Amino acid sequence: MQFSVYQRPFLVIAVCSALLTQQARALVSLNDGTDRIYVTGTVGVSRDSNIFASNGGGGDYVYSGGLLMEYTRKAGWIGVNASIGVDVSRFDKFSGEDFQNPRFSAEFTKQTGRTTGSLTLSAQRQSRADAALNTRNTSWNYNAGLNAHYPIIERYSLSGGVSYNLTKYVDNPAYVDLASYSANINLFYILSNERDLFAGYRFRYSDTSRNTQDTDHAFNVGISGRIIPRVNGRVSVGYQVRTPNDDVAGASYGSTTASASVAFAMSKKLSLTGRVAKDFSTTASDTSIDVTTAGLDLQYSYSAMFTTGAGVGYGRNRFLGRGGLIPGTDIHRDDTSFDWGARISYVYSQNLQTTLNYSYMKNWSNVSFSDFERSSWSLGASSRW
């Protein structure tokens, strides 16, 4: 028996639901519960109207699955959280975009004693639609970070960290690999039991496979904890300067920098979260961009089993330097985007959860091929044991 392209998504959903409702393996618990192993399986189907995030980009059905194994240890003065998994996707028409992406992460935490902190390591293969290049790309992403917090006296404390990030693109010599090294330090002042003030500095050095470099200096001030009554989170604002270390890129760029993540509990069932981020970034074509993103997400928990949510988002990418000029002009590329989405989640049991999502995005650009619309729906299920 053969199935049409319209019947295949519903066939996949039926098969996936049947598989996930089978008897699940029990949670593995070792050493009196201090060591635990979890296994999570996911399956899904989606319809994406523009898988390349470009003007005229084609749409397709995408069938996906994943397997994740997690290990946690909470004993002694070092805690461990580690995971290894793989994500697989198959495209109905654009089979050349199929991927199998492994991932790994590990975190070692110290939460006792005067000095606390964490060491994080991760590696993952990622395939995505890149709105800055308006095509799909695949890359390996490696990250390592060390963070620490030390109380100086009763109301003052220091926190700081160093990190390394490497992005290596696969099977496309036109893309530029990027390595970045950063270090930060923050001074905290305990204003009250609910609120801290802080001021900080971050240094970041970026080096590409094209032998170009950028140096960033960022200064910020902020508040964490209770922002205002019933609103909790962390907010920081500051100023940042990026200096390219080559003659081609041009002069330094200065801009505000910001980071915010806050939550407002409107009632026991209704919550609103907000986020803002503004920072410099580097594209796979070795162009610096000033990235601004903001979003609001509203979630309503009808019960412990049934939740709904909706969100809106805003983004702007300002392309900088000579690499950001539209070919044949002295005008820099400038993209502005708006997106919204909705979701429904239902928990059948502690081992099975299903989610239905819809999202829409519109990107306006002064470059024709970057002016596009994109919408998608997805239905997925996950089982954790």
Image: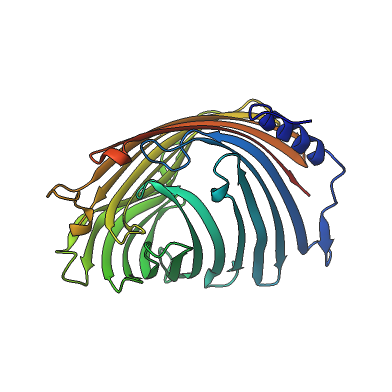
Using residue 75 as the reference point, say whether residue 340 is left or right of it: left
Name the side, left or right, on which 353 lies relative to 292: right
Q: Nearer the viewer, residue 21 or 149?
A: 21
Q: Position of residue 23 (x, y in %)?
A: 87, 43
Residue farthest toward the front in the current orientation of the protein:
1
- Along the line of sight, the residue nearer the viewer: 8 or 300: 8
Q: Residue furthest left?
A: 330
Q: How is the image coloured?
A: rainbow
For the point 64% across and 51% down, the residue is 88
Q: Is residue 268 visible?
A: no
Q: Nearer the viewer, residue 35 or 356?
A: 356
* Count of marks overlaid on the render: 0
Asked if residue 85 is positioned above or below residue 298 in the image, the reply reads: below
Q: Please state if 43 lies on the left or on the right of 97 as rendered.
A: right
Q: Position of residue 95 (x, y in %)?
A: 58, 46
Q: Position of residue 368 (x, y in %)?
A: 27, 38
Residue 228 sits above or below residue 6 on the image: below
